[in-house]
C-alpha cells in the first residue's frame, strides 16, 4: 500500500509539472472559453484555454488578425486545444519578430506546459511570420496553415508584382528589416518563398487557403510559388483555392477541411497513433 501511495504521489506531481504554471491575468469570457491576457517580452499576448486540455496540451498559434476567421479555432478549442497569440504587429516577419516569437514559445512550452510543436496559423501578412518562424525552427512546428498568406514582401507590401501593395507598410518594412533602401529590400533572399527547404526537409505539412482572384496578395506570387517550390523540394502541401474570391473573406465557411488537415497531417505531441 505504501508503494502504491508513493507511486500515486509521484504520478500526481509529474502531471502537475507537465501542466505548467497557472495562466496569469484575470480570466475573461471569449466565446464561452476563458481568455487570459498578459505580456511576453513587453508585448501583449493572450491564450484562450479549453475546458479540458487534450493529451499533450496541443496549441494553435495565431499571428496577426487573431479575431478573424475563428471557426477552426473554436473547433480545436472544443477538442481540447489552446489558442495562443502574441502581438508582433508591424514587424512583417523580420528577425526581431522571430526573436519575440522565440520568447513566446519558450514561455508557452517551458513555463506553461504547452506542447513543443504548435500548429502555426497566419492570415494575410501573418504568412511572413509563420513561414519565417518555421524556417528558423522547423523542429518546433507541427504544421503550417496560411490563409491568403503573404509569402514574398516584394508582392505585398512592396507592390512589385500585380498586387496593389501598400506604400506605408512598405516604408515601415524597410525600416524594420534595417534595409538601407528599396533596392536592398528587393534584393533580399530570405523571403518565405526563398527559404522553404528547412520546412520541406523537416516534413512540416503546409495548408494554404486562398482566393484565386486575390488582388491584394496575389496567389500566383505568394502561395502559388510556395506550392510549386515545396512540391519540388519533396515536401507536403495542400492548397484550397476559393473560386472568384478576392483577399476577403478569410477562412472557409465550413472549417472542417482545415481542422481535418491539422488533425490528420500535423505531427503534434499527444496525437493518437493510428
Image (cartoon, grey):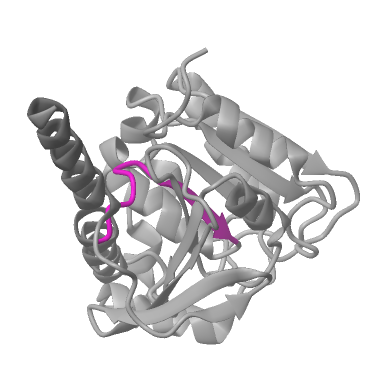
Q: Residue at x 49, y 21 (%)?
A: 232
Q: Is residue 10 above or below residue 63?
A: above
Is residue 1 visible in the rendered image? The answer is yes
The residue stretch that appears in magenta: 112-123
Say if the magenta span includes residue 67: no
Left or right of 244: which side holds 266?
left
Q: Residue at x 57, y 66 (%)?
A: 156
In the rendered image, the residue lying farthest to the front is 1
Left or right of 22: which side holds 150?
right
- Where does residue 59 sit, x and y in percent of width and height? 45, 50
Query: Total label count?
Result: 0
Q: Residue at x 36, y 52 (%)?
A: 132
Q: Residue at x 51, y 51 (%)?
A: 52
- Where does residue 151 sit, x and y in percent of width and height? 51, 52
- Where does residue 77 sit, x and y in percent of width and height? 59, 54
Q: Dividing the image into 4 quarters, which one contains the N terminus?
A: top left
In the rendered image, the residue lying farthest to the top is 274
Say if the magenta span includes residue 116: yes
Q: Is residue 196 above or below residue 168?
A: above
Amino acid at each position: 500500500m505504501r508503494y502504491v501511495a508513493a507511486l500515486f504521489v509521484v504520478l500526481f506531481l509529474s502531471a502537475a509539472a507537465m501542466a505548467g504554471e497557472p495562466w496569469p491575468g484575470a480570466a475573461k469570457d471569449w466565446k464561452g472559453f476563458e481568455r487570459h491576457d498578459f505580456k511576453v517580452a513587453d508585448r501583449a499576448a493572450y491564450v484562450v484555454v479549453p475546458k479540458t486540455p487534450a493529451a499533450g496540451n496541443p496549441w494553435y498559434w495565431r499571428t496577426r488578425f487573431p479575431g478573424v476567421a475563428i471557426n477552426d479555432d473554436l473547433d480545436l478549442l472544443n477538442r481540447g486545444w489552446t489558442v495562443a497569440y502574441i502581438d508582433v504587429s508591424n514587424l512583417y516577419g523580420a528577425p526581431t519578430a522571430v526573436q519575440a516569437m522565440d520568447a513566446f514559445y519558450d514561455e508557452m512550452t517551458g513555463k506553461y506546459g504547452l506542447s513543443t510543436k504548435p500548429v502555426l496559423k497566419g492570415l494575410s501578412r501573418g504568412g511572413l511570420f509563420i513561414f519565417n518562424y518555421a524556417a528558423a525552427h522547423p523542429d518546433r512546428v507541427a504544421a503550417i496553415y496560411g490563409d491568403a498568406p503573404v509569402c514574398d514582401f516584394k508582392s505585398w507590401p512592396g507592390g512589385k508584382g500585380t498586387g496593389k501593395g501598400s506604400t506605408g507598410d512598405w516604408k515601415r518594412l524597410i525600416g524594420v528589416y534595417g534595409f538601407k533602401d528599396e533596392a536592398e529590400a528587393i534584393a533580399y533572399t530570405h523571403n518565405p518563398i526563398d527559404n522553404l527547404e528547412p520546412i520541406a526537409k523537416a516534413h512540416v505539412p503546409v495548408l494554404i487557403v486562398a482566393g484565386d482572384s486575390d488582388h491584394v496578395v496575389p496567389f500566383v506570387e505568394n502561395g502559388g510559388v510556395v506550392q510549386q517550390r515545396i512540391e519540388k523540394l519533396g515536401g507536403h502541401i495542400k492548397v484550397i483555392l476559393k473560386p472568384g474570391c478576392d483577399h476577403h473573406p478569410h477562412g472557409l465557411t465550413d472549417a472542417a477541411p482545415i481542422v481535418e488537415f491539422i488533425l490528420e497531417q500535423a505531427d503534434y505531441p499527444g496525437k493518437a497513433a493510428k
